[in-house]
Amino acid sequence: MYDENGISIDGHVDGWFTDDTRGRFEAYGWRVISGVDGHAREAIQAALDWAIVPCGMPTLICCNTVIGWGAPNLAGSHDVHGAPLGPQETAATRAALDWSHPPFEIPLEILGAWDGLLTGTRLQADWNERFRLYAEAYPDLAAEFKRRTAGDLPADFDQMADRWIATVSQTTAKVATRKASQMAIEALAPLLPELLGGSADLTGSNLTNWSSCRSVLGLRSGNYIHYGVREFAMVAIMNGIALHGGYIPFGGTFLVFSDYARNGLRLAALMKLREVFVLTHDSIGLGEDGPTHQPVEHAASLRLIPDLDVWRPCDALETAIAWRAGIERRHGPTCLLLSRQGLPAQAGVAGRADHIARGGYILAEAEGGAPDVILIATGSEVDLAMQARERLAEYDVRARVVSMPSTSVFDRQDTAYRQSILTKGIGCVAIEAGVTSGWWKYVGLDGAVIGIDRFGESGPGEAIFAHLGVTAEKLIAAALVVYARAA
C-alpha cells in the first residue's frame, strides 16, 4: 500500500527489500522509507523531506526504478547499461517521453526551474551575515571554525611538533611501530582538535585510540568512531568526512584487510583527500595468524596507487615523522604500515628527523671509505640491514645502509638528492618482507632483492622470517655477490 507520494506505508515492496529486510534494518536502529517511485520527482522530494526530520537515527530510502526507463524496447534490460541506445531507440525514446528539443538544448522553463543561482546567492548572503554576527559575538570560536574548514593547522603546530619530535628522537626502547603510532596520536591529539579517529573493530590491535578520546555513541558526540568490521565502509565514511572539511580523519585495520578498503583508498587518492590510514600487522612478523593475515603483496600494491603516500617506518622516530607528514599533507592521503612486533630504535646520523622526512636517507654510512655496496631496507628489515652492515666489515666490504620508509616521498625528491643516496656505480641490495617486484627499479638488473614472492606460514614471527629467508645472512650473501659482480 502506498500513499499519494508513492511512499510505502506498509513496508512491503517487490524485489530485495522485504518485510524481513526492513525488520533487520530497524532492529539496528535505522528508519526505513521504502517503496518510493524513483522516477517521480514528487515522491523523491517527499521522501527526502521526511528523511531530514531529526529522529536520532540514520534513514534508509529505498526507491523502485527501472534501468533505462523511458526506452520503450530496451528498458529493464542490460542492453542500456553500458552501450548507447542507437539512432532508432533514441528516436523511439524521444517519442515516448514527448521530447522534441534538439540535442543539448535545455528549454527555458526547465532551465529556470533548475537554476539555483539566485536562490543560492540569497542563501549564501544570509549565511555570511549570520556568521558575521556570530564572529562578533564569539571571535575565537569563529576564527577556529575558519581555520579548521580551511584545512589550516594551528599557528603553533610547527613549534609544538618540533618539540615532540625532539623528544621522540631520544627514544632508545624497543617498540612496535603500531605502539609508536599510538604514542604519536597521544602527542598529536591535544594539538589538533580536528583529529577524528577510529578503527574497523580492531582498536585493541591497531592501537588507534588515545587516553582522552571519546567514542561517538548514538547521540553522544566524540572524536573516535567504532566503524565495525567493514573496512570499505570505514574508508568511504572517512572520505565523506574529509570532503566535508573541518576534520582530519584517520582509521585503522590490518594491512592485509586493505584489500577490502581498496576502492575507497583509491578514491581518497583520486580526490586528493587529507586522511591517514593506520594499517598494522604489516608482515609475516605477525606470526601465528598465518598466511591469510600476513600481507606480502599489499605494500607493493598500495605503492602503485597514484597520489597515495605509503610509509613503512622502522622505529618510533620514523613513525613520528610519518605521522607528521600525513597530517601536514593537505592534498592526498597517507598509509602507515606498522609492525606488530617490537623493533629496536636506530641511532642513525645527526639531524636524522630531517632526513627521514625525505622518504629515503643514509641511516649508516660505510666506514673507512666509499661504500662497496648499498643496503636498502624498510620497516622491520632495517635492523637486519644494520646487522648485515657490521658483519660485512668482516669480509672487508664497506656497506651503506639506506632506510627508505616511503618510496612515494623519496621518488618526489630531486635527482641530485636521490643520486646522493643511491650512488651510481655502487651495487645495491634491497630487503623487505614482501614481494620483490617494486624494488628492482632501485637496485637495477645488477642488484639483488631479498623478499617473499609467495604466501607466508603460521608460526612464531622470527621462525617464519628464518624459514622464508628474510635474514641478515641472506642479505650478506646477496651483498657479497653483488659486490663481486661490480668488482
Image (cartoon, rainbow, N blue to C red):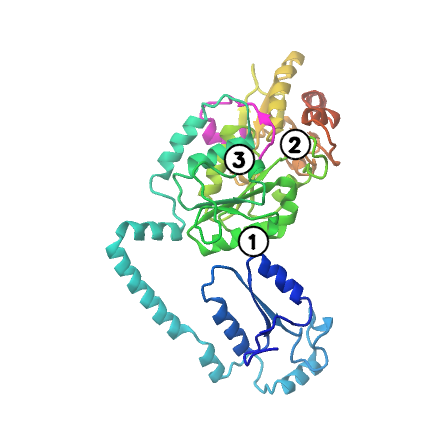
Q: Nearer the viewer's eye, disc 2 or disc 3?
A: 2
Is the N terminus in the top left, top right, bottom left or bottom right quadrant? Answer: bottom right
Any mark on residue 115, and which? Answer: none
> Are the residues at dot 3 and dot 1 in contact (C-beta closer than 8 Å)?
no
In the rendered image, residue 274 lying in the magenta stretch gets the answer no
| Image x and y of residue 394, in percent | 65, 12
| Image x and y of residue 304, in percent | 63, 45
Any mark on residue 236, and which? Answer: 1
Q: Nearer the viewer, residue 425 or 192?
A: 192
Instruction: List the residue tagged with mark 2.
Output: 286
State the extent of the magenta-drawn residues as a range.
Answer: 337-361
Mark 1: few, some, or many residues within 10 Å (few <14, many ≥20)? some
Q: Which secondary structure, mark 3?
A: loop
Q: Which secondary structure, mark 2?
A: helix
* Visible residue check, residue 357: no
Instruction: List the residue tagged with mark 3.
Output: 359
- Quick one: label 2 or label 3, which is nearer the N terminus? 2
- Side (left or right) of 247 relative to 477: left
Q: CA distance from mark 2 to mark 3?
A: 25 Å
| Image x and y of residue 440, in percent | 67, 35
Q: Is residue 396 positioned above or below 327 on the image? A: above
| Image x and y of residue 70, in percent | 65, 80
